[in-house]
Amino acid sequence: MKCQLLIISLFCVVTISSCKKEQVTQYAPIEQYPVDSILNSIDSKRAMIITAHDDDMALSSGTVSKLNKEGWEIVSVCFKSNKPDRNSVHIQAAKHVIDSVIFIEFTENEYRNDLDDGRKGWSPIPGSEFNKVFNYQKVEKSLLKIVNRFDPTVVFTLDHEYGGYGHPDHIFMSKLVLDLAKEKKIKSDYIYQSVMTPHMEKSIIEERHSRRMESWGYAADGWKNTRELYEVDGMPDPTVQVYITSEAKNKMKYLRSYNERERKTMGFFIPAFEEYEAEEYFKIFDREFFRIIKIENL
C-alpha cells in the first residue's frame, strides 16, 4: 500500500511539474526557407562570431557547434565584461560549441560615452547619436587587429538594423563589421546575421516578452517604440535556415552554462529552455536562421 501511495505521489509531482512547463510550440518557427548550402561549399573553414556581448551568440550556437564538429575553426569575439566571473563563465560555456574566445579589452564604460549620465545600456538611442555615444576608432582598431590575425572566411553577427531587439550595442557592433567589410578592411567572404522568422519575432517578442514586461511593471509596448525610433519593422527576414537537432545537447549545455542573469536574458528570446530536456526542446526549435550578406557584393 505504501509503495502504491509513493508511486501515486510521484506521478502527481511529475504531472504538476509538466503542467507548469510553458508550452513553447506556439513560439516555434512556422516558415520555411532554403537550407543553407554555402557553408558546406567553403574550403577555408574558419569562422568568427563578432558580437557586443558574450551571450549574443546564443541564436547561432547550434550552427557553429555543427560547423565545429565538421572541422571548422571557430572563435568568438566580444567586449570584456566588467564582471570577471562573467568572462570566465563565457569561456567555459563556449567550449561546448566552439574552439575559443577572444575579448576586446574594453568594458562598457570604455567603448561608450553615455552611461555616466544614468542611461541604461540597453535603452535604444537614435541613429544620429551613435557617433557621439560609441568610440568607433578605438573599437575598430582593436577589432581589425583580431579579425585580420585570424582571417575568417565567414563572420557571424546579429543584424545591423535592429540588433535582435534594439540594443544599441548590438547594432553598433554589427554595423561596424558591415562597414569594415564594405571598406574591404575585413576580407571575409560572407557575413551571416542571426535573425528570427517573422512568426518567432511576433510570438516571442511582441507577445510573450510584452506580457512579461507588463507583469513586471514595465511598459508592454517597448518593442514598438524601439522600432519606431530605429525606423524598422523588426529584424530582417532570413535568407536561409540551418537544421540543428544534431547539436541539441551541446547547445543546451552552452545555454545552461551561463550565470542566472545571462540565462534569464537568453530566456527572453529562447523561451523556457531551462524547463525542457535538450532533445525535446530542439526538436521543436530545430532550425536557426540567418540573413546572408556576400561581401564582394557590398
Image: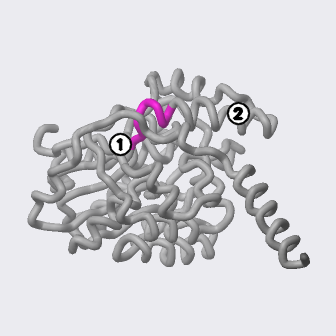
Amino acid type indicated by mark 1: Lys
Q: Is residue 133 above or below residue 78?
A: above
Q: At 15% from the left edge and 51% from the top edge, which residue is drawn? A: 38
Q: Element under label 1?
A: helix
Q: Position of residue 36 (x, y in %)?
A: 21, 48
Q: Position of residue 203 (x, y in %)?
A: 55, 33
Taking the image as shown, residue 199 lies to the left or right of residue 241, namely right
Q: Nearer the viewer, residue 164 or 9?
A: 9
Where residue 256 sits, quadrant-wise, is bottom right
Task: Determine which of the numbered discs, if any, sits on residue 185 in the image.
Answer: none
Q: Nearer the viewer, residue 270 or 52?
A: 270
Which quadrant of the figure contains the C terminus? top left
* Residue 114 visible somewhere in the drawing: no
Separation of marks 1 and 2 at Cα, in angstroms = 30 Å
* Viewer-side label of 1, 2: 2
* Residue 56 visible somewhere in the drawing: yes
Which quadrant of the figure contains the N terminus? bottom right
Q: At 70% from the left edge and 28% from the top edge, which residue is drawn? A: 220
Q: Is residue 93 magenta?
A: no
Where residue 217 sits, quadrant-wise, is top right
Taking the image as shown, residue 185 lies to the left or right of residue 29, namely left
Q: Name the outermost residue toward the right.
A: 2
Q: Nearer the viewer, residue 2 or 111?
A: 2
Q: Element under label 2?
A: helix
Q: Magenta residues, as a range?
A: 195-201
Task: Determine which of the numbered discs, if any, sits on residue 175 in the image.
Answer: 1
Q: At 27% from the left edge and 37% from the top edge, which residue is drawn? A: 33
- Looking at the image, tell me whether mark 1 or mark 2 is earlier in sequence order: 1
Q: What colouring style does the render use?
A: one colour
Q: Name the residue tied to disc 2.
A: 211
Taking the image as shown, residue 149 lies to the left or right of residue 244, namely left
Q: At 74% from the left edge and 51% from the top edge, which residue is drawn? A: 20
